[in-house]
Amino acid sequence: MNSSQDIIRISNSARSASNFTQLGEILMSELSLILPIDRLNIGLIDIGDYSFTDAFVKGQNVPGRALGHQRTLADTVVEAGMQLGEGIIIGDEPPEKLIEHFPRLKSTLDTGIRSMLAAPLETDNKVVAAIVLCSIRTSAYTLEDLKMVRGIGLRIIERAIELKASS
């Protein structure tokens, strides 16, 4: 696997999408060929409301979280990824330890998810979205995976915003 070639190939494919759902489907299809993904979520972030809204979800979703579900960023994996700047990977810790650190994660872990990769995406120096990958496998993601997903996200964020605005 050549990460830079994957970033270019997947980004170009996703940017060719004609609507937001298609963009998400392309990401899921392409990324699942090289990463273990049981759920992919693209969430829109509103820093003013400090919220995360599910704009695209594919795979094993959390019960009660329909498309458009909005929740606070406080105490979430996405918030931790934003604070770190480049994103975050979790999955080496037992679920009990993860819940201690991220209390809002319990409902996700109850679905069998054991690893997550959260890549915040910004435009004009403002975080506006995040791509979140989830796997039932422990230790499913690496730093290289995070860099690749973030690289793809940063290349497609403008197109994603444009498509979401027109949907």
Image (spheres, rainbow, N blue to C red):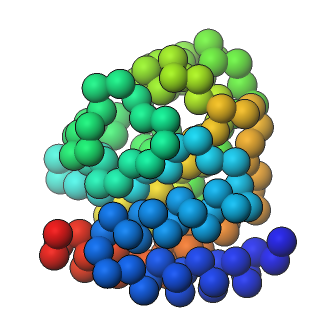
Question: Percent x, y for residue 93?
Answer: 72, 25
Q: Identify the residue shown where x is 29% and y is 74%.
A: 19
**In which quadrant of the rendered image does the C terminus lie?**
bottom left
Please indicate, yes or no, whether residue 125 appears anywhere in the rendered image.
Answer: no
Rendered residue at 42%/63% (across/down): 24
Residue 90: quadrant of the picture:
top right
Compared to residue 30, the image places residue 13 above or below, namely: below
- Name, please, the residue furthest toward the top: 96
Nearest the viewer among 151 and 136 is: 136
Residue 5 horizontal side relative to residue 83, left or right: right
Image height check: is 135 above or below 114? below
- Residue at 31%, 81% in the rendered image: 18
Q: Quadrant of residue 46?
A: bottom left
Eyeballing the image, is 149 above or below 69? Answer: below
Q: Quadrant of residue 94?
A: top right
Image quadrant where one finds the N terminus: bottom right
Asked if one can make out residue 20 in the rendered structure from this viewpoint, the answer is: yes
Q: Is residue 30 shown above or below 50?
A: below
Q: Position of residue 25 (x, y in %)?
A: 45, 63
Q: Residue furthest right?
A: 1
Q: Residue 87: image x %, image y %?
A: 56, 54
How many marks on residues?
A: 0
